[in-house]
Image (cartoon, grey):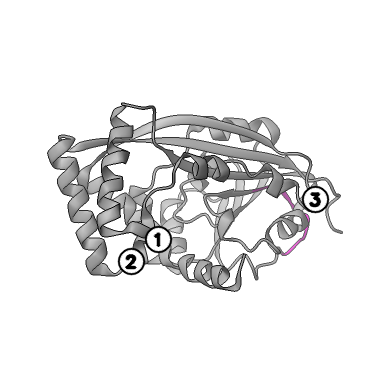
Amino acid sequence: MTKADRALREVRRHTFDRVAERYATARPGYPNAVFDAIETVVPPPARVLEIGPGPGQATLPLAERGYSVIGVELGRNMARVARRRLAAYPNVQIVRADFHDWRPSIPGSFDLVLAASAFHWIDDEIGLAAVSRALRANGWLALLWNHTVRGPARSRSRTFWDRTDELYRGHAPSLVPYDGRAERRELDRRAEIRRGGLFHPAQRRSWRWRRQFSAEEYVQLLDTYSDHLAMPADQRGRLYDSLRELIDGSFRGVVVREYLTVLYLAQARRPAAK
């Protein structure tokens, strides 16, 4: 990653905090099957370190299952929203800190380190090494992402993607959604996890599912993405207006967005630090 790319990432990883409330309501969570899979390798009550919990989309299912969770959250507003949403769970603590600087009070004390749609914001030179230091001997890493997929040819969701591509080319050409080849490259991170020899080869599991959105719900969702938030307000407004018009006019007010949720599970190769 170039110096310019690192600088851009540093700016964008702070953008979510200004839409913390919207993020909590607009962003979808994760299928229950994800947490079933995690539970098979690390059953509760285990001690979990969550990197970048945001408003708690993955934290809440962990808390409900009885895990003891410490979430390290960069954003002040995100941390506030997460604490409010998880107030009923004494087994959860949200710490406001940058994971790049944060250190556990007792190294090697976690059974599981989890990052849900957050690990790509962590510096490559810090991430896996810091996770390894935080884990107990033979502890587990769980990395989780929701990816959007276009859907099969001639499907309603694929038609919507194709129509929105036209709008992005007109209003925000730099944000034209990725093509299938870019999507496939994004979805496999096993080599990244294996690099450095800190973890055994990762298991990769995935689940396909879909969710419906009204025009306003869809725009609210887009307005939680860092690349959309980085757009000038007037340009972003024109794009959103065109999307609302498309959904309400051509799709009768409802669109389907298809998701592929991908989970990587990897066991630490090295004993925990003393």
Which mark identifies residue 231? 2
User: Could you say where residue 239 lies in the image, as x and y percent from the top left?
Assistant: 24, 57
Label 2 near label 1: C-beta < 8 Å?
yes
Neighbourhood count class around disc 2 (C-alpha, 10 Å): few under 14, some 14–19, many 20 upward: few
Which mark identifies residue 198? 3
Q: Which quadrant would the C terminus be assigned to in this image?
A: bottom right
Q: Secondary structure at mark 2?
A: loop
Q: Is residue 65 visible?
A: no
Q: Secondary structure at mark 3?
A: loop
Image quadrant assignment for residue 206: top right
Left or right, 73 with reference to 149: right
Neighbourhood count class around disc 1 (C-alpha, 10 Å): few under 14, some 14–19, many 20 upward: few
Nearer-N-terminus badge (1/3): 3
Q: Residue furthest left?
A: 249
User: Could you say where residue 139 lies in the image, as x and y percent from the top left?
Assistant: 76, 44
Vertical comparison of 160 with 242: above or below = above
Part of the protein shown in magenta: 105-113
